[in-house]
Structures are given as structure tokens and as C-alpha cells.
Image (cartoon, rainbow, N blue to C red):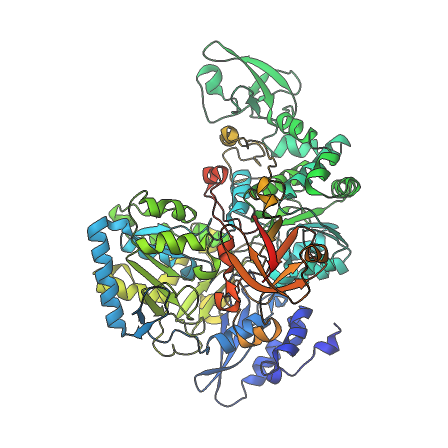
Amino acid sequence: MEDNKLKMNRRTFVKASAATAAVTYGACQFSQVFEPAQAKAAASTEEGVKLVRTTCAPNCVNSCGHLVHVKDGRIVKVEPAEFPDPRYNRICLKGISNAMQKTYSPDRVKYPMMRVGERGEGKWKRVSWDEAYDYIAEKIKSIQKKYGDGAMSWISMTGDYGVFGQLISHRIANVMKGTILTNLGIMGDLASNVGFFPATGMLQDGHPWPDLMNSKLAIFIACNYAETALNDSRFIWDAKENGMKLIVIDPRFSNTAAKADQWVPLRPGTDAALLLGMMNVILNKNLHDKKFLTDNTTGPYLVRTDNGQFLTPNDLNGGSADEYIVIDAVTGAIRPREGTGQALSGKVEVTLADGTRAECRTAWDLIADYISRWTPEKASQVCEVPVEVITKLAIEYATTNPAAIKISQGANRYWQGHQAFRNAILLGAICGNHGKRGGGVSWAGGTLFKTIAGTPPCWLNPRLDEGYEEKMVVGSHMFEKIPKDEPYPIRGIWFNHYNYGTQMPNYNKFINEIAPRLELIVVNEQLMNDATTYADVVLPACSWYEQEGELVASWSNFYFQLRKQCIKPMWETKQDHTIYAEISERMGYGKYWGSVEDSINEVIDNFLEDRLRDIDKKELWETGVTSALYPEDFIPFEDQKYFTKSGKLEIYLDFLHELGESLPVYVEPLESNRKPKAEKYPLTFMNVHSVFTVHSQHATLPWIQEVNPEPRVDICKADADKRNIKDGDMVKVFNDRGHVVLRARITESMQEGCVNIYEGFWKKQFKDGHLPSLTHMELNPVQDAVFESNYAPYDNLVEIEKA
């Protein structure tokens, strides 16, 4: 869209119809619509208008700054706030709707509410905060007296990128000597970490968006940034204008694929197989970077073929069990890895300390042998990408310098999704692209996960000085453990920032097997939504614009922002921090809480990483934004120092040998369309993110509904014709776990054998049934061995029929 078409009156923008806003929104160029500095100057002359810089951070990765206009205590306008780098001055329809409509929604939870009917009936009575606190306190005391301290549990989700939003449940659980239910696996994002962490020692890291300007080629694997990172997608289009070629690998013809130079559609869940086929081509054509593999990875280290473990001095002579053995490239003798000149390939037989003999091969040779099985023909049979496409893609990646790979959640939401990430990391290593400007293998960077991993233990567990050891249960295991009282009975859950009613896997199992065992369910919420349905107590949470304060990180840049209070809390709403401080005071734990400001300062002052801890706090408090102390042109692993045991990029994981995944491998998705279950349920069901809502947060807001009024199931014409389904027909999507009834949308963006329903819609928006009832939470032993099993919302089979 041309600039002159984007110019519009700022004063009338928020009042414009959603349809008009959607046109601008789809253009992805809000930084061209607004001129924040001029807007601030103009607005400051308006009588009675207060300007507040705050931040929007609803798990959409952008963490946009908002300049909020307040008059007579009410938000009257919102526009982009300024950043030190103006490329991050942006806003979108979701953020505008959140400020202008969600804040004042008739669905707001205005007062503490207690259930008066059966769970799920929706019958409530208004109570005072004192009544709510008294009831909750007595229930917690009763539960802990009968079942033990850990019987009361807390869980937060990622509905807010603030430190409190994501981690306040961790703190309150420790204050109350309760159980922390972890959220990493149950949110569906953890398979990415399962791939990244063992290899790099980092939960995640990625090249900053501006580094795409240094790339000649970018391969996006399951990345639909034009929808899911909308306000950062400008960096992609700028890089394309700068000459970067963009290739998108995705089962769907997504909005991002539509902007790419090449779209590579593949069978859902088979990304790892495609990558193995590419690596086979690269090795056969001798295009791999042997020096990088030798110098910077664990490829040269010897592995015992009898047990799959790295050979160590302890195996040979009773020395260290934490070191590695290599083959000297000149002498052919084995030696400790210190120094240079080790061989990347080789095989030796050694005498072990017990006198027995053992064959050893380099880790690289074991990996290369596995890759040799994955010819382009075999990979094509698995992923259904033509051989010539795999071959050309491999050669292009290997011969373009620099070339970037970005891989995102779409690949990780299959039962074996971590394999795609491991193979992407290996592909980057084979071509020497890690730590290279314009290259790398990126998932996400910025301050967000650095903040989560670096939040100080003293804040997370204020009883640390007392020697208190926190209790923790893996959230993705709750469906197996809570019904069996393992590892101990849990009889209460307190939720915040988690609309589990739309986002939880295995929803029917939670309702039928877990909820009946719980003597207390408490939900802190802004809106009466699907999470509040089965609660015993619903507590009114502040909107972001009412919160007293919050420290907000970003997934896409190195800024920290301060969420400042724009308007006073309406009705009887309170911030989560305040709610937990007040219930703690009621129960005799008040000494563990200070003010919101105290908590923000305590977190900053004790961050585990100095580049987070030493930020300019004065600038943060005064201006609302400051940067973590990373250089503007930061490139992860540019120094080739990894945070692993070996200090190298670990491409072979011996601790996974017994589970069959010491090598980066490929196995079929759990509910593959090639497995017997597909005879009854032949369609692979995806539920991807929408440009219109971040999960369920915006799905019911009027401006959003104006442009995205109802859920639909996307199906290709061939699959629709087989079932006599016409565009717009009401259909039933079902499997052996549940069903949902909604309207069909016939589109050629879907491959045959694959359907999609955009996730985030509330139960009331479907004709019948509920989307999360179709999903499962099957545990994966490999993921559990690294962290915990990941929710796999795309790894489902369904059938569709006319309703």
C-alpha cells in the first residue's frame, strides 16, 4: 500500500470502523501511519488530556509501546509510543482494541464473584474482597491441613509478557508452601527449547530482526510472521527490498508464504525429514563446512559404539568422566581434546580400564551415517516435497553466504516437534552458519526468555534464606498425576493469565477427571470467559492500563519497558501482585511482600545476568523504556562460545541414546496420517494462530469480530468434495476425544488431507462443542528427559461431516 493511502487523521483513527482499520492493519505499516513525536506535541495542547507511555504485551512477541491519551479518567485514544530506535514505534488493531474495548468490556470481571450453582452452570453471587479472601484462606488452610502443604497449587501462563504476569504464581506458591505447576510444556512452545537447550545451552536465542538486512537468503520453517509477529514483519519486507531471497516451508499457504519468493509445502509434521534430505544432498556434494564442524561442534569427539556414550578418560584409565577424547589428525592416536588438529572422522578400537576392547567412532561419523540413509528420494516419500525441490533448496542454502534459518512454533507443535529444531541446528552447523551475521538458526531472542531464565531466585522464592525448597509438578503431567495423587495429592489450583478453557490440552479430561477432585479453583481474570466457568471464586484482575506497574520484556528486541498506570483501577479490580500480597497478609505471610515498585526493583537489582541487571533504571522509571546491555548488532554465538558442558555446539546427545535420539533423527508424528488411526480420522488437524487475536484475548472484542466474526474450518476443495461439503456449510469436526461444529471455508491454501481452525475462539462462538476437546496431552519421554513433554496441538487426526 502506498504511503499516501496510509496517511489518516490520528484523531479519527480509533473511531474508525474495524473494517477500515483492518485495511490499514493488513498493510503492516503502522509506523508510517503515526508520527509519535508530533502526535505527542499536538496532544499535549489538548486541555485536560494526560499522556502516559505504557506497553502492550499479550504474548504476540512484539511488546509494542503505547502512548495512551486519558481524559477525565478514561482512555480516549492510543497510538504508538516512541522507542530509542524508531523502527519499533508501531501498533496494531489488537492493541488498539485491547485498550479501547477490552478495558471497558461489558464482560469485565468487576467484583469478586463466588459460585452458587454447580461448576459450569454459570451461577454467581457478588461478594466483597474480605469475603472472598476469608473463603479462599480457610479453604487453603483446610486443604493443606488434610493433604499437606503442596496440596494447593498455582499456575501462570504467558497471557502477559510482564515479569509478574509470567512468574507471580511461582512466588506465591513458595510463599504459601504450595506447588508450582510449570507452564513451559503445557503452553505448547517447549519442543523448541528441547531442541535448542541441549545443543546451545540456551533456552532460545536468535538473530535480531535488523540482521536480516545482512542475509542473502532466509529460509523460514513454520514461520507465519505476517500474522503472528505482525508488527515486526516490516523487517522481513525491508530485507527483501534489500535483495534477500525468502523461502517459506509450511504446510499452509500462509500470509507469509504469499509474500515469499518460494513456498515449499510439505506434509504436516515432517520438517525434520525434509531437513535430513537437504543435509544428504549437501554431504554428497561435499558442500559442508568441515572446519566449522571440527572447531565448533562435538562432531570430532569419540563415541563408544557399544553404549552410545562419549568416550572419556575415566573409561580408559580412571581419569575424568567429564572430558572428551579425540583422534589426532596427524598421528591418528587418541588424545584428550585440548589443543587443535583433531580429526572430524575416524574409527579406533580402545582398551578400556577393565581390560575389554571397545570400538569408538567420531560423533560426526555416526551422524553422517544416519544422514546417508536420507536420500532426497526417501525424504520426498516422507515429506511429499519433490526430489528436485529438496535438491535445489539444499544446494542454494549451502552455496549462499550468508544464509539464515528461522524456525518457529508451527514446527514444534507436533509430538516429535523438537526433532525439527535439532535438525535445523545441525543443518546450520553443517554449513557453518551459526554465529555469522546474516546467518544463524533462530527461534526467538530479545529479552523475554533471558528475563525468565534470569529472574532472581530470591524473588521467586522469598523463603530461600529459610532453606525452603520449592515444590514443583510438571504442568504437562497434571493429567496423569493429579488423578492418581502423584507425587502427592493436589486439591486446589489458582490460575492467572491462563484462559485454560480455550487453551488447555485434553480439556475434557481436565473437566471430567481433575476438576471433580479439586476442592478449590480460583481464577484471576479480566473477563468472564471459559476459564471462569468451572471456578469456585473469580477475582477481578486489572487491565494492563490499570496496573500499578510491571516490568515487560520482549521476544523480538532488547528493550525493557515499564508498564505505567494510565487510569485508576475500575470497579473493584486489583493487580495480581496486590491480590497475592493481600491474601498472604490475611494468612500471616505478609512479610514476604513489598510494594509493586519494590518488586520491580528487586527483580532488576538481582537479575542473574549483568546485561539485564545493570540497565539504566533511572531511564526506565522516567521514560518507560530502556535497553538491556546488548550491543545493537548483537549476534548470538558470534564468539563460538556455547553454554554447554563441552563449550561447543552439541550435535550429538549421548544422554538420549537409550531413547533412540542421540542423533538428530526423524520419526512420524504421533497421529500421523499414515498410521492406522487415519483410516477412521483421515485429516490432519491444525489450529494455528490468527492475525486477529492473541490466543483468546481479543476474540470477542467488537472491532475484532467485525473483521473476524466467527470460527471456520479451512479445507481444500478436494477434501470438501469427497464429503459433499460446500463453502459456508455447517460441519462437524470430530475425533474420539471430542467435536466442534462450525462453518466450512473452502480454500486452496490448505493441502489435501489437512484442515485448520484458527485457535483462540471461545466456546460460545461455536455452534456446538469446543476446540480444545479435540486435542491430547500425550507424554514424550525424550522431551521429558530434557525438560518436560510439550503440548502438541497440531498433531491430531479428525474427520469432518456435514452437521
Residue 242 placement: quadrant: bottom right
Quadrant holding the N terminus = bottom right
Q: Position of residue 489 (x, y in %)?
A: 28, 47
**268 versus 120 height, above or below:** above
Q: Position of residue 469 (x, y in %)?
A: 29, 45
Residue 387 placement: quadrant: top right
Quadrant holding the C terminus = bottom right
Q: Position of residue 755 (x, y in %)?
A: 63, 55
Q: Position of residue 118 (x, y in %)?
A: 32, 65
Q: Is residue 354 left or right of residue 289?
A: left
Could you tell me which residue is drawn at 73 percent across and 75 percent down?
3
Q: Is residue 215 left or right of residue 684?
A: right
Q: Residue furthest top?
A: 355
Q: Is residue 783 left or right of residue 265?
A: left
- Give the camera-side residue of 268 and 544: 268
**638 versus 518 height, above or below:** above
Could you tell me which residue is drawn at 29 percent across and 61 percent down?
593
| Residue 724 visible within the image | yes
Could you tell me which residue is drawn at 56 percent across and 70 percent down?
94
Q: How many marks?
A: 0
Residue 613 placement: quadrant: bottom left
| Residue 58 visible within the image | no
